[in-house]
Amino acid sequence: MEKPDWLDWATEERKIGEIIRADDPLWFSHICQILFDHDPMMIQLISEPDGYAPEVGSIIRSLPQCMSVDDVQQLIFNVFTQWFTPEFAGGRSQYTEVATAVWDSWKQLQSEV
């Protein structure tokens, strides 16, 4: 049986996420906690913040390209659409609060560097 194409993509994304986590484990965990606290897809399936680690790796990797909270909202929405499905990810507006929290954290991190 042939493995689906998305499996290669997901495996590669997880590897990249682990490299990102190793580079700054505290900030990575902080972003996991933000996603866990805001639960943008409004589901209670994730039982701990690390459940969002695959998505966080994808988000953090692209954060440097974001210039506004709106960019972060689009990024997070895109990441959840890729990791899940457009139907499961819901509407872009569901990601407003989490995007604001991630953007604020990102800007604070940048000011410390």
Image (spheres, helix red, strand yellow):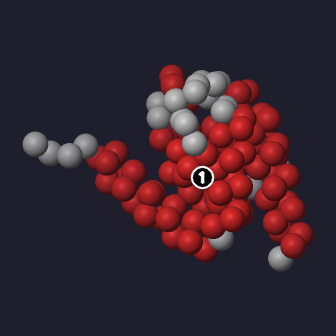
Q: Residue at x 71, y 27 (%)?
A: 94
Say which of 105 and 62 sits in front. Answer: 105
- Residue 55 visible within the image: no
77 with respect to 4 (left or right): right
Label 1's element? helix
Q: Residue at x 72, y 35 (%)?
A: 38
Say if residue 80 shows up in the picture.
yes
Q: Residues within 10 Å of mark 1 (few under 14, many from 20)?
A: many
Q: Position of residue 81 (x, y in %)?
A: 53, 36
Image quadrant assignment for residue 30: bottom right
Residue type indicated by callout 1: Val
Q: Position of residue 52 (x, y in %)?
A: 56, 45
Picture layout, residue 30 above or below residue 81: below
Q: Position of residue 6 (x, y in %)?
A: 34, 45
The residue most toward the bottom is: 113
- At a point 57% along the width and 66% down the height, the residue shown is 21
Which is nearer the eye, 103 or 52?
A: 52
Q: Looking at the rendering, in which quadrant would you find the N terminus?
A: top left
Q: Which residue is mark 1?
A: 56
Q: x, y percentage for residue 31?
A: 69, 52
